[in-house]
Amino acid sequence: MDRRRRTELVEIAVTGELTQSEQEICQRLLDVPPGGACVLYFNSPGGSSYTGLALMSLLLFRDLNATAVVTGECSSAALWPFAACRRRLVTPHSVLLFHPIRWESAERVGLAEAAEWARHFGELEADMDRLLVELLGGPPETIYGWIQAHRHVSGRELAQAGLAELVELATLPLFGPDTVVSPSRRTNSSSRARRQRAGLP
């Protein structure tokens, strides 16, 4: 394989409301060759649950060697693509909000439709919470506790729980032009096993 192809690194900003930037982020991810390396810089309050699911699925389906860097906030639906990254870096100042899925519908909604939305989101919430725990690979009781408590988790706390690597605000030499992003030392399973745990082919 050509060395330039092996060392090519794509950097993607995952910022603002995910729903508004979904098309651009998806296209940037599709520009990365399958199995290729990329760095995702997160500063997002989240957005649609379906958008978070779509970005996470792209990362897993295409087996991307992705590194997540939380430069500010990574909350709500943004947690799923963050969790799908093989390596996760946070600073002591990073903030991640865990909470149950929230759903909204039109104001003029019938009782039957509202009941169906409630049923669907109840199932989606349980499934996505389980998936987040599987992808992060940390203690389920800790992550479920954060979700139920609507907890703002600092980067330091996340690293102490073994879910990310804590880095200081300094130049990261591993992002040089000739450097391939390496999976975290905490990643002790293959990409195939990760996809199987996430319920993906």
Image: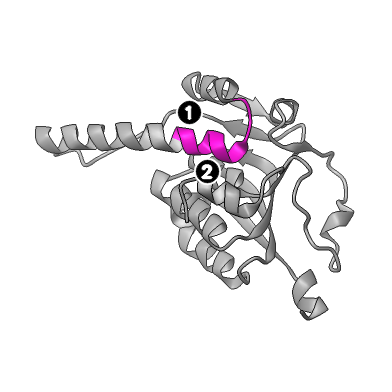
In which image quadrant can residue 189 be found? Answer: top right
Q: What residue type is labelled 2?
A: Arg
Q: Which residue is drawn at 86% across and 68% down?
A: 178
Q: Position of residue 201 (x, y in %)?
A: 47, 56
User: Is residue 85 depicted above or below 30 in this figure?
Assistant: above
Mark sitting earlier along the chain (2/1)? 1
Residue segment shown in magenta: 129-139
Q: Can residue 47 be seen in this view?
A: yes
Q: Which residue is drawn at 47% across and 33% down?
A: 130
In which image quadrant can residue 168 be found? Answer: top right
Q: How is the image coloured?
A: one colour
Q: What residue type is labelled 1?
A: His
Q: How far apart are marks 2 and 1 (CA)?
A: 22 Å
- Side of 71 where 149 appears, left or right: left
- Side of 159 where 25 appears, left or right: left
Q: Residue at x 52, y 68 (%)?
A: 27
Q: Can residue 110 be seen in this view?
A: no
Label the magenta part by its dominant secondary structure.
helix
Q: Residue at x 63, y 48 (%)?
A: 42
Q: Name the residue under label 1.
A: 99
Q: Mark 2 points at which residue?
A: 197
